[in-house]
């Protein structure tokens, strides 16, 4: 497990975020790719010290190891700052496990298309069988199912992060094979088998905690769902979680699929967090945080980008 700084300054453009800014940590889905170059971080960086958790295909860290790594990272980096966990799909299972077992480490959660419904879905019956497919079939499968996951091209950040050696092809067949090779390298059969088991274990540990929640919570929660998610029943699941998590807010975005975070054209996480008053509450004590009221055309374009 490694943690990478996210956003433009991570790649040499712009200054390193100020230490007084709240800490934002992104927890990815089952692919484990941190997406540190995502345009979402370009929007968020003026308000947060942005980081991502990245879990490589060879990593076999168990649930306790992942939670311990998260806990250690936050304790070492927070320095009395507010902490926001932004977690997508499987990452939401990790984020909730951490927040409910160590609430003192988390001030706010943003859970995107959470995989907390996984064990109750048809996908849980199919996914364990996929690693047993012949290699040539498994390598073709990712590009076939990408339309279910999100908008066309959602996978480019994932592939680029893991496999930067292959150039894009204009030929449809060659590009189709490139996408499949890239995605199958991100999540090889053995890795999928391990992560699927990890997800089940995370859910077994989490569900009793959710059912035993009291009427109050020490952290704010924003639940986000795409109503075009064909992988998980995210609309229904976020409603269930809203009933379980005290004070949780919920937003359903029309036309957005499972790859919610990658859909930067239709999803502006900065605006969603602002509408939920989460950014304001986390940054209120920070004297060097930019105003959320756009004053110039540049401010407006960053808010809307």
Image (cartoon, helix red, strand yellow):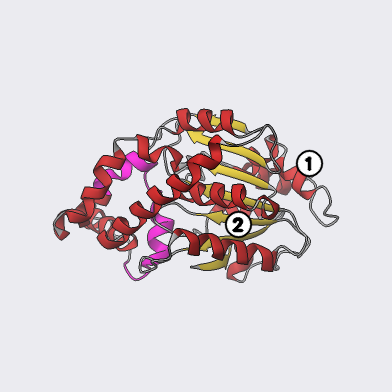
- In the picture, the disc for residue 293 is 1
Q: Residue at x 49, y 51 (%)?
A: 91
Q: In x, y percent, where is residue 32?
A: 43, 59
Front residue of 10/201: it is 201
Residue 189 visible in rendering: yes
Q: Does dot 1 land on a helix, a strand or a loop?
A: loop
Q: In x, y percent, where is residue 159?
A: 37, 60
Q: Residue at x 47, y 48 (%)?
A: 205
Above or below for 194 versus 292: below
Instruction: Please identify the quarter of the rendering in which residue 18 is found.
Output: bottom right
Q: Does dot 2 land on a helix, a strand or a loop?
A: strand
- Asked if the magenta segment contains residue 24, the reply would be no
Q: Residues within 10 Å of mark 1 (few under 14, many from 20)?
A: few
Quarter of the picture holding the C terminus: top right
The image shows a total of numbered marks equal to 2
Residue range of the region highlighted in magenta in the rendering: 143-166
Front residue of 26/295: it is 26
Q: In x, y percent, where is residue 82?
A: 74, 54
Q: In x, y percent, where is residue 146?
A: 31, 45
Q: Residues within 10 Å of mark 2 (few under 14, many from 20)?
A: many
Pointers 1 and 2 in contact (C-beta within 8 Å) = no
Q: Residue at x 39, y 36 (%)?
A: 232
For label 2, the residue is 25
Above or below for 236 versus 269: above
- In the picture, the disc for residue 36 is none
Instruction: Please identify the quarter of the rendering in which residue 41 is found.
Output: bottom right
Asked whether, in this view, residue 277 is left or right of residue 224, the answer is right
What distance separates the C-alpha of mark 1 from that of mark 2?
24 Å
Identify the mark nearer the N-term, 1 or 2. Answer: 2
- Asked if the magenta segment contains residue 158, the reply would be yes
Asked whether, in this view, residue 299 is left or right of residue 36, the answer is right
């Amino acid at each position: 497990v490694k943690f990478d700084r996210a956003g433009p300054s991570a790649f040499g453009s712009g200054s390193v975020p100020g230490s007084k800014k709240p800490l934002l940590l992104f927890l990815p889905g089952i692919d484990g790719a941190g997406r540190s170059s995502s345009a979402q971080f370009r929007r968020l960086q003026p308000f947060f010290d942005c980081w991502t958790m990245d879990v490589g295909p060879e990593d076999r860290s168990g649930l306790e190891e992942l939670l311990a790594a998260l806990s250690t990272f936050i304790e070492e980096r927070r320095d009395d700052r507010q902490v926001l966990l932004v977690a997508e799909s499987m990452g939401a299972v990790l984020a909730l496990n951490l927040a409910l077992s160590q609430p003192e480490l988390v001030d706010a959660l943003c859970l995107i298309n959470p995989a907390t419904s996984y064990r109750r879905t048809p996908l849980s019956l199919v996914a364990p069988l996929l690693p047993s497919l012949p290699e040539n079939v498994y390598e073709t499968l990712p590009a076939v199912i990408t339309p279910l996951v999100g908008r066309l091209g959602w996978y480019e950040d994932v592939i680029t992060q893991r496999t930067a050696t292959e150039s894009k092809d204009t030929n449809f067949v060659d590009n189709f094979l490139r996408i499949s090779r890239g995605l199958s390298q991100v999540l090889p059969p053995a890795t999928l088998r391990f992560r699927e088991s990890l997800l089940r274990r995370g859910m077994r540990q989490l569900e009793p905690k959710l059912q035993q929640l009291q009427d109050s919570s020490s952290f704010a929660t924003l639940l986000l769902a795409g109503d075009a998610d064909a992988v998980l029943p995210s609309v229904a699941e976020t409603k269930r979680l809203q009933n379980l998590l005290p004070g949780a807010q919920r937003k359903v975005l029309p036309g957005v699929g499972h790859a919610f975070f990658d859909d930067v054209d239709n999803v502006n996480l900065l605006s969603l967090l602002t509408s939920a008053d989460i950014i304001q509450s986390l940054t209120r004590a920070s004297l060097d945080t930019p105003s959320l009221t756009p004053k110039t055309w540049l401010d407006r374009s960053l808010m809307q980008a």
